[in-house]
Image (cartoon, rainbow, N blue to C red):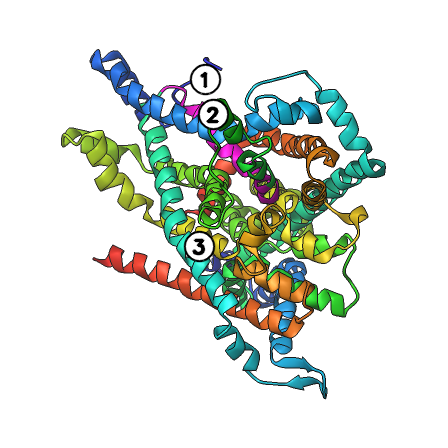
Amino acid sequence: MSAVPTVTPDAGAAVTATEARRRTGAPGSAGGKVFPTLFMLAFLVYFLMPLTWLFIASTKSLDDLFSSFGLWFSHFNLFDNIDQTFSKDGGVYWTWLRNTLMYAFVSAVGAALLAAAAGYGFAKFDFKGKNLLFWFVLGSVMVPTTALAIPTYLMFSKLGFTNNPLSIILPSLVSPFGIYLMRIYAEAAVPSDLIEAARIDGAGEFHIFRSIAFRLLAPGFVTVLLFTFVATWNNYFLPLVMLSEPRWYPLTVGLAQWNNQATQGGGATSTFNTVITGSLISVVPLIIAFVFLQRFWQSGLSAGSVKG
Amino acid sequence: MTDATATADITATARVPGGRRKRAGTRHSFAGFLFTAPFMVLFLAMFIAPLLYALYLSLYREQLVGGNTFVGLDNYKEGLSDTQFTDGLKRVGLFLIVQVPVMLGLALLFALILDSGKVWFARLYRVGIFIPYAVPTAIAALLWGFIYGRDFGPFADLADKLGTSAPNFLGDRTMLWSIANVSTWTYTGYNMIILFAALRSIPSELYEAAAVDGAGPVRTAMHIKLPLLRPALLLCAIFSVIGSFQLFAEPNIFYHIAPQVIGKAYTPNLYVYNLAFADQRLNYAAALSFLLGIVVFAVSYVVMYASRRQEAR
């Protein structure tokens, strides 16, 4: 970890040059880094402490959890905990993990495809009412998603459409922020001349989109995909409202329910070790994805902040 | 930006000779409509339709005598004088006034430090502080619930070693700030990345000019970086305001640890949820959803307006 570079590769050449000058320059310049480094390290401890605790707690048996010191290891019981987590209640954790993956994956691919097509349509074509439609969609970013969840539930229950995977996936497909992002992206990434050239060659509009524009839109597509994936993976309110049977639960709702049971059970009859280990398993995949896909986050978030 | 694209398209179409121009243009515009159509259909079905249905519901009331009756704005009037709802609004208002500035202040400070290059292991903090955003809010609430807990939380353990007892993090006076801590922990890194990305897009010539003028790092931050960060900060502020009013997962999960403190209406969203599911008062829940949406809109607008005014000054 000590080999982590201080200057990011994406920093401009000029910044790197000043950096080098600063570093080789006055002897006091190294001293100038001590205080900011200590400051950031102190906060890093705060941000990583809960997850460190979660990992340590996952390695303990239920007895050790209560009897040993929280911020250090006791007997290593992680694999037994994992085993208990996956076999509890007839292996329902597998079902929750599969549901979460399925909801997140289908929503992400669907939302990103819809956003790519619509963003391309908004950016590269002119049609009646286009701007009105776009501003309408953009305004909806301000509507709180949980304020929308209850109305959506009320409508779905009237139609007898709750308690199934589509009641989670269909609302998750609509990503107004994704449309905004893809429109900006398509305007910059797909040259109008290229589209026109393909038209003169006799290519159809859908063919142009599929074989030319889509490739140029790929980085924006991945960004929207990631955002929707994480948003659906993390969703708690919508599935809590829509689903009434554990077999459709995602991890968030399932684990919260296990925790409620453990809290009510209290003391020795509780199974907090499965809740803790289950929580750890549920956050590991996303943490890995975050660390390795960081540049997509940064580009996506900076594109979003171009216009306030 | 739209107009520029539109003009480019028109000039491009104009190259096609003679009578084909107009037909091609119409065909293209219809294709553009088709590209947006799948999204717009879902948008209407999943966004507009539920809102309209809830609006309709909110104007009716289920009564013992006479069944479903039109009551006009009665549900809204009841909501405005319902202290459980207004107390919840005040509570998230207090939360917002304290938590959002603390979180955005920290995120801004981290972003400025990372951007200044005056720190070792910059990438480590950038990733490390962002990681909690990968933890779902519900899981973060579970996790902090354990950490605050008296049975096996690290604070209770530490206090035990010191021979005292840890404070009750989920008590009457501490609950709101314990929830604020969960939000700060989860979202500071997200805001930091937005601000850091915005800082990276500032052209470096500006810094060089400031350095020539003899400006130190603090003056550069105050007079060059901060004004240019305004749009990104505004975006962060608005998203945080919307997020605060939506508080649900944390109080919903802490309810099972401290039912007396949270109750049925700790936040407006929790209240609406309980009205709809525990009490089956769907019409009233729909009206309160709308009232909450209106409050969020109004507060977001005030934030935006205040920022514009300051910019104009």
Q: CA distance from mark 2 to mark 1?
A: 41 Å
- Three-letter amino acid code at the position of disc 2: Gly
- Three-letter amino acid code at the position of disc 3: Val
Q: Nearer the viewer, residue A119 or B260?
A: B260
Q: Nearer the viewer, mark 3 or mark 2?
A: 2
Q: Quadrant of the C terminus of chain B?
A: bottom left
Q: Are marks 3 and 2 in contact (CB under 8 Å)?
A: no
Q: CA distance from mark 3 to mark 1?
A: 35 Å
Q: Which residue is mark 1?
A: A4
Q: CA distance from mark 3 to mark 2?
A: 41 Å
Disc sitting over residue B163 in the figure: 2
Residue A131 coordinates in the image, percent (x, y):
50, 65
Q: Which residue is mark 3?
A: B241
Q: Is residue A158 above or below residue B10?
A: below
Secondary structure type for disc 1: loop
Q: Is residue B131 above or below residue A302?
A: above
The local crowd at label 3, few if under 14, some if 14 to 19, many if 20 or more residues have their Cα within 10 Å, is many
Q: Which residues are magenta?
A: B120-141
The local crowd at label 2, few if under 14, some if 14 to 19, many if 20 or more residues have their Cα within 10 Å, is few
- Three-letter amino acid code at the position of disc 1: Val
